[in-house]
Image: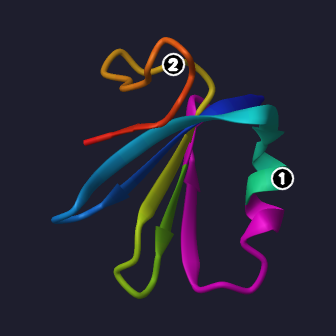
Amino acid sequence: MEYPYVRVSVVGVGRADLRTDTPLSGEDICDGYGEQPVYIAEDGASVTVTFDDAGPVCTYFAERPADWDERPDGSLLTR
């Protein structure tokens, strides 16, 4: 499965929604974090990466979520 949508959330700060230039596979996502202390959960429709040190939560989606925040020109919108 390919994941072209990424949501980066930071508790207490906000979130950013963005699209990748090239959709990533589950293997691409797992390989990209290498030896970093993260927990990776894959459920078929998304892959969620949680950092061990209370860092951001990165969720990669196969389909665009209904509550997606993105400007029509594709630029980043944060909330």
Q: Which residue is mark 2?
A: 64
Percent position (x, y) of residue 21?
Answer: 78, 33
Decide: few, some or many residues near mark 1? Use Cα within 10 Å; few <14, some 14-19, many ≥20: few
- Number of the label disc, if any, that sits on residue 52: none
Amino acid, disc 2: Arg
Q: Secondary structure at mark 2?
A: loop
- Taking depth in this image into account, of 48 and 73 the one nearest to the observer is 73
Q: Would residue 51 be counted in the magenta stretch? A: no
**What is the distance, in whole Å, between disc 2 and disc 1 at their CAs?**
19 Å
Residue placed at 44% from the left, 20% from the top?
A: 71
Position of the N terminus, as image quadrant, is top right
Residue placed at 34% from the left, 80% from the top?
A: 54
Taking the view exactly as shown, the residue that stands out farthest to the left is 12
Amino acid, disc 1: Asp
Q: Secondary structure at mark 1?
A: helix
**Disc nearer the start of the sequence (2/1):** 1
Decide: few, some or many residues near mark 2? Use Cα within 10 Å; few <14, some 14-19, many ≥20: some
Residue placed at 69% from the left, 33% from the top?
A: 3
Q: Which residue is mark 1?
A: 28
Q: Relative to 21, is 32 above or below?
A: below
Residue 29, quarter of the rendered image? bottom right
Position of the C terminus, as image quadrant, is top left
Please state if 79 lies on the left or on the right of 43 as rendered: left
Percent position (x, y) of residue 26?
Answer: 76, 46
Residue 65, quarter of the rendered image? top left
In this picture, which residue range is highlighted in magenta? Answer: 30-47
Q: Would residue 37 be counted in the magenta stretch? A: yes
Q: Relative to 28, is 71 above or below?
A: above
